[in-house]
Image (spheres, grey):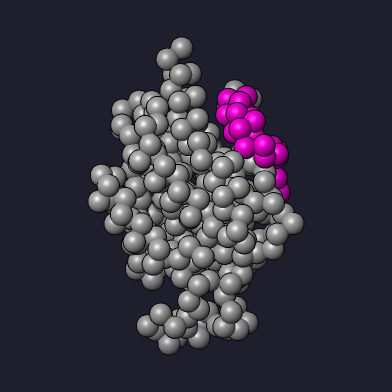
Amino acid sequence: MYTFFHLTKDVQRFKNAGCECGVVGKSHLGQDIPYLFLGQKTGTNVLVVGSTHAREHITSLLVARQVWFYLTQKVNLHGGIYFVPMLNVDGVRLCHEGVDWIKSKEQRDFLIETNGGYDFALWKANANAVDINVNFDAHWGQGASNVTKPAPANYIGTHPMSEAETVAIAQFTQQTNPDCVITYHAKGQEIYWQFFQDEVAKARDYRYAKMIANYTGYKLVGQMPSTGGYKDWCVQKLGIPAVTIEVGDDRYPHPYPYHQIDDIVAKNLLVPQKMTNTIFKEKQK
């Protein structure tokens, strides 16, 4: 299992090896959400995000593996990559540690009641029982699976951008102004890229998504009945290409088994580099 503790250790290891490290913002419970940056801030920049959903913490290990590879290998990179390995730090801690680490008894009781017990292994939401990936201001509340009260998954929140994590990554995205966003989820070996783009943007975004599909072997999926996602917000509000990559074979249950990490890494290791360099080359034309 890749835990919040492992992430904090890795961030220090990356920093010691010369990686730029910082904080995106704070979680609902006030924990730092770390980011890492490699490459040059001139040229093309790409932003990679893992663990928006708590139980999908295997994606944090994937992103950490990507960081270490780019940090230690001579990778040809025309620009730079921002990595946010674990957006939902509170939720991941709930998955691994339950509620014992939370100081407030009221908060602990709320989470246990919402979860229906003490085992949070399948929890997707943040520590406010809001699903971050349906909380963004992009057709908010119009998704087919949306829930309107606190829940382990799919609760949209009281209003769009109600959550600390949602606001933090939205502001960070606006500040860093990436040319593309890649957000990792699990599972299904699918790539989501479409969200009501106009025809020009749709052709561009399909081209990038197809490039990733060709490299990973994952299936491209068009418009879905889900809304309020981070990818959706990037596409609609920022006008940039954004892809949600669902790693891992659907035959395995959640939480996704870590014995599959090498296969996931092999299929995704160079995705950020390929996206950065592809966009850079297109800019030069």
Q: Is residue 77 left or right of residue 214?
A: left
Magenta stretch?
201-229
Q: Residue 200: where, in percent of width, then height? A: 59, 23
The structure residue drawn at horizontal position 59% and vertical position 41%, both measured from the top left corner, is 267
Q: In the displayed image of the protein, which residue is found farthest to the right?
A: 251
Residue in the picture at 49% in, 67% down: 91
Indicate whether 119 appears above or below 269: below
Residue 170 in view of the camera = no
Q: Is residue 95 or residue 232 the one in the foreground?
A: 95
Which image quadrant is residue 39 in?
A: top left
Question: Residue drawn at (34%, 68%), measured in percent from left and top?
Answer: 30
| Along the viewing direction, whichever of 18 and 155 lies nearer the viewer | 18
- Membership of 263 in magenta stretch: no
Asked if residue 223 lies in the magenta stretch, the reply is yes
Q: Residue at x 64, y 51 (%)?
A: 248
Give percent across and percent down for residue 282. Answer: 48, 18
